[in-house]
Image (cartoon, rainbow, N blue to C red):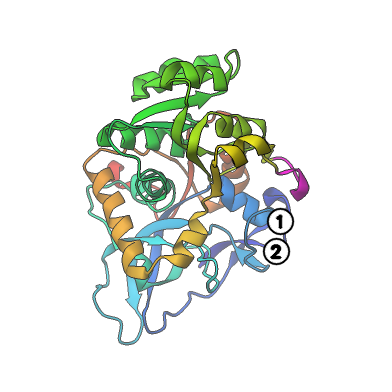
Amino acid sequence: MRALVAVKAGEPTDVLRLESRPVPTPKAGQVLIRVKATPIHASDLHVLRGRYGFSPGFPAVGGHMECVGRIAALGPGTEGLTVGERVVAAVVPAVPGPPVDGTWQEYLVADTRRLLPVPDRLSDSSACQLAVNPLTALLLVTRELDVQPGEWLLQTAAGSTVGRLVIQLARHLGVRTINVVRRRAAVEEIKALGGDEVICTEDEDLVQRVAEIAGPVGVRKAVDCVAGPVGAQVSQSLAPGGEVVVYGALSTHRQTDPAALTIPLQARSVIYETKAVRGFWLNRWFGAASPEDALRALSQVRGLVADEVLSIPRGRPFPLERFTEAVSLAEAPAHGTKPLFVFEDGRDEDDR
């Protein structure tokens, strides 16, 4: 089989090689999946650079998040699934937990406890993106912060993939959103998506605008994917006893010094107003959640996408041979399209 392998840590286009490898054999409790489509996330690329929260150990097949495919073989004694069944594999490595295989290969061995059957009416493009961004949005809003109908939720990076999903989910749940964007051109787009209020940091003061929208006390709940000074302003905008969950650091994605990945919080505000700033990382959630709870959450996401509550933008397909082009698209500014590695005939299920 063909596999896209990183021979060492470094810039993806420098260290990735297209290799031929033996088709792996599933063990008890595992299945062999014929991969159909798998996305290229920015986090996948940071893993290859050695700048993420875990290292797969090199050489390593790329893609440590998710894919969709059909079961090609069952491991000894494996029950509850059938050959030919269409499944999503959530292969986000649990931390702490054992290593898992990368998805950028034609065949993948996966644990049955990380598999979710998906209906044929869901396109490959949507199905292969179920297990990371939509799940993150769901967990942030409902599990991490338990935002209730009518409450305000402040979020940064509202135009990101997770940000857009948060807006859609919040609208479905009756949650009001204050959405922070960097560019004035993005404001109308976020409002059209269903964002209640939009703050543009290009020409508006975040703290002042939150006070105008939600009242001088501020908001009780927020999610931040930017960190740096913007993350600090989100903390300032919290009401006493409020909390912000930080799940990304977009402002520092090109930063190579770990010591520079900071949020300059105001100590007085945190201490005297007892505000909470804490992190969320999907890998650690998988490490703490039981397999049953993880599948329940994934099933909930599958239902939201199937019912069109959450809309996943259609990805752009690439064969493995064009990995350099695909990787470049994954990090192109405001590209708006998720590159996908596709196998077999390269067509999405929608095109049949």
Q: Quadrant for residue 17, please give it.
A: bottom right
Identify whether 78 is placed above or below 152: below
- At label 2, the amino acid type is Val
Read off the magenta span.
254-261
Query: Residue 313 appears at what percent x and percent y?
Result: 39, 36
Q: In terms of secondary structure, where does tag 1 sit?
A: helix
Image point (32%, 37%), residue name: 169
Q: Are marks 2 and 1 in contact (CB under 8 Å)?
A: yes
Q: Quadrant of residue 87?
A: bottom left
Along the line of sight, which residue is nearer the eye, 257 or 241? Answer: 241
Residue at (62% x, 66% y) in the render: 56
Q: Which three-letter amino acid code belongs to the residue tagged 1?
A: Val
Is 172 above or below relative to 206?
Answer: below
Q: Position of residue 22 (x, y in %)?
A: 53, 75
**Front-lying residue, 108 or 259:** 259
Residues at marks 2 and 1, CA–CA distance in whole angstroms: 6 Å
Q: Secondary structure at mark 2?
A: loop
Report the residue that reaches farthest toward the bottom: 77
The stretch drawn in magenta includes residue 260? yes
Residue corresponding to mark 2 = 7
Give me the residue at 34% from left, 76% from top. 73
Alpha-carbon neighbours of circle 1 within 10 Å: few (<14), some, or many (≥20)? some
Point out residue 177 in the picture as x, y percentages from the top left corner.
39, 28
Please identify the dominant SS of the magenta region: loop
Q: In the rendered view, does 311 fall on the left or right side of 247?
A: left
Residue topped by disc 1: 15
N-term mark: 2 or 1:
2
| Apparent side of residue 334 relative to residue 267 in the rendered image (left or right) | left
